[in-house]
Amino acid sequence: MVWSPPVVILNFKTYREATGIGAERLAYVAETVSRELGVNVAVAVQSTDVYRISSRYEVIVLAQHVDHHREGSWTGHVTALALREAGAAGSLVNHSERRLGISEIAGAVEALREQGLVSVVCADTPSVAKAVAALGPDYVAIEPPELIGTGISVSKAKPEVVTESISTIRSLGLEVPVICGAGISSPEDVARAIELGTVGVLISSAFVKAKDPQSFLTSVCEAALNSFGRRRS
Ligand code: G3P
């Protein structure tokens, strides 16, 4: 399943400001802006916050990680079934801060599909993007790890990583939508990401640490909508 573009995914990571009650505060912002502008905004929260957020806010809730294990005796693992029961719409898979092996990624994508959940599989290079795209995820998210958390955006500093990822995936005849992230911190960064051919962005620190998360998110969603509109026309 895919959401109508543009898509803005806010990764809450394990930031204190985005944990527990902080996650609620930021999810409320995401819900408000998403509703006002009609943009699909998703929040990727810690698994302990999935139910808390999904049961109280009308926003797309993703987990930050899912294991490939199914039901059974897998102490400490996070299953797709448990995420669905908690109200998640899907999960990030293989984020740079929670890497998996290729067979684990394949298993996680399949486990999410079995539960009717969306998979957003992260890749750090175009060749990894190609490999994971072949597993049939709903989205591929390209994020060069060296730019994560720097405020230097992938769309401006390393646009070729994004365009190569898209072209290498298309060379396989695959239409899987591509998102990019790492360092995205302004409306211009978002507009540029969409001009490069993505359907959206992944943003973390610039949103979580913003003095005014609502005005920041409003500005990036407006930029995403405008840029996507220009690309279509
Ligand atoms: O998943 C998004 C993330 O890794 C990017 O982080 O802080 O550079 O927006 P940040």
Image: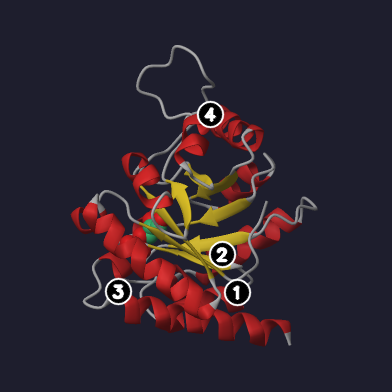
Residue at image x 21%, y 59%?
A: 17
Residue matched to label 1: 196
Q: Position of residue 152 (x, y in %)?
A: 34, 71
- In the structure shown, which secondary structural element does the residue marked by tag 2 occupy? helix
Q: Nearer the viewer, mark 4 or mark 3?
A: 3
Residue matched to label 3: 213
Q: Quadrant of ligand 1?
A: bottom left
Q: Amino acid at mark 1?
A: Leu
Q: Earlier in the sequence, mark 1 or mark 2?
A: 2
Q: Position of residue 22 (x, y in %)?
A: 23, 58
Does the numbered disc 4 mark a residue whose Cβ is under 8 Å from ligand 1? no
Q: Give the Cα separation between the discs numbered 3 and 1.
A: 25 Å
Q: Which mark is residue 162?
A: 2
Residue matched to label 4: 104
Residue at image x 42%, y 38%?
A: 99
What is the number of callouts on the image? 4
Q: Quadrant of residue 64?
A: top left
Q: Give the Cα separation between the discs numbered 4 and 1.
A: 30 Å
